Amino acid sequence: MEERELRGGGERILLVDDEEPLRKMGKEILERFGYRVFTVRDGESAVEAYREREGEIDLVILDLVMPGMGGKRCLEELLCLNDSLKIVIASGYSVNGSTRDVVDAGAKGFIRKPYELRQMLGTVREALDSLPDTGKGENR
């Protein structure tokens, strides 16, 4: 994708990560490219923030491994609130085994950590541009 294709148009993203430096870095990258970003540090806060701002969040970037409610449980909770919510998993682990299971459970994509600008922005753009799900169990 060209850099202009990676740009956002003010879409609102909830970034969930327990590591403050990664939250900060992710927010800076996304805001520099035209997205509006809310951040929280854990799964419980993500579910609460989504409930409070349900109509205001276009995409969730969700860390897989966090204390308390982990990424898989948080993904399930968020999809119970809105089964067509666009969620992208972020992890320092490769996509295999349990990571693959979480991605297959309803995520729109996967972002490697630490964040690499083009890969992060490309995955975000693809997820946002994907067609809405019908919530009937098809591939997300």
Image (spheres, rainbow, N blue to C red):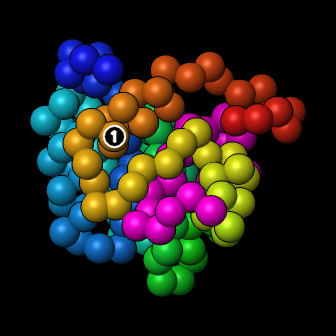
Residue 49, percent from left and from top: 45, 56
Q: Residue 65: x, y in percent?
A: 49, 74
Q: Residue 122's spot in the image, x, y percent?
A: 36, 32
Name the quarter where the C terminus is drawn. top right
- Residue situated in front as seen by the camera: 44 or 21: 21
Residue under the image location 47 percent in, 68 percent down = 93
Label 1 is placed on what type of residue?
Gln
Question: Label 1: few (<14), some or many (≥20) within 10 Å?
Answer: some
In magenta, the rendered stretch is: 77-96
| Extreme residue toward the right, this view | 136
For the question of whether residue 77 can be seen, the reply is no
Placement of 9 over or under 84, stated as above or below = above
Residue 135 shown in magenta: no
User: Label 1's element?
Assistant: helix
Q: Residue furthest bottom?
A: 67
Q: Quadrant of residue 134?
A: top right
Residue 64 percent location from the top left of the image: 51, 66
Is residue 82 in the magenta section? yes
Q: Name the residue nearer the viewer: 79 or 89.
A: 89
- 11 w.r.t. 27: above or below: above
- The residue wearing badge 1 is 119
Q: Nearer the viewer, residue 76 or 118?
A: 118
Quarter assignment of residue 29: top left
Please state if 111 lies on the left or on the right of 43 as rendered.
left
Q: Is residue 40 left or right of residue 134?
A: left
Query: Quarter of the image containing the N terminus?
Result: top left
**Can see residue 11?**
yes
**Rendered residue at 28%/24% (across/down):** 6
Q: Residue drawn at (51%, 54%), measured in percent from left and top?
A: 89
Count the marks: 1
Identify which residue is drawn at 34% across, 60% down.
113
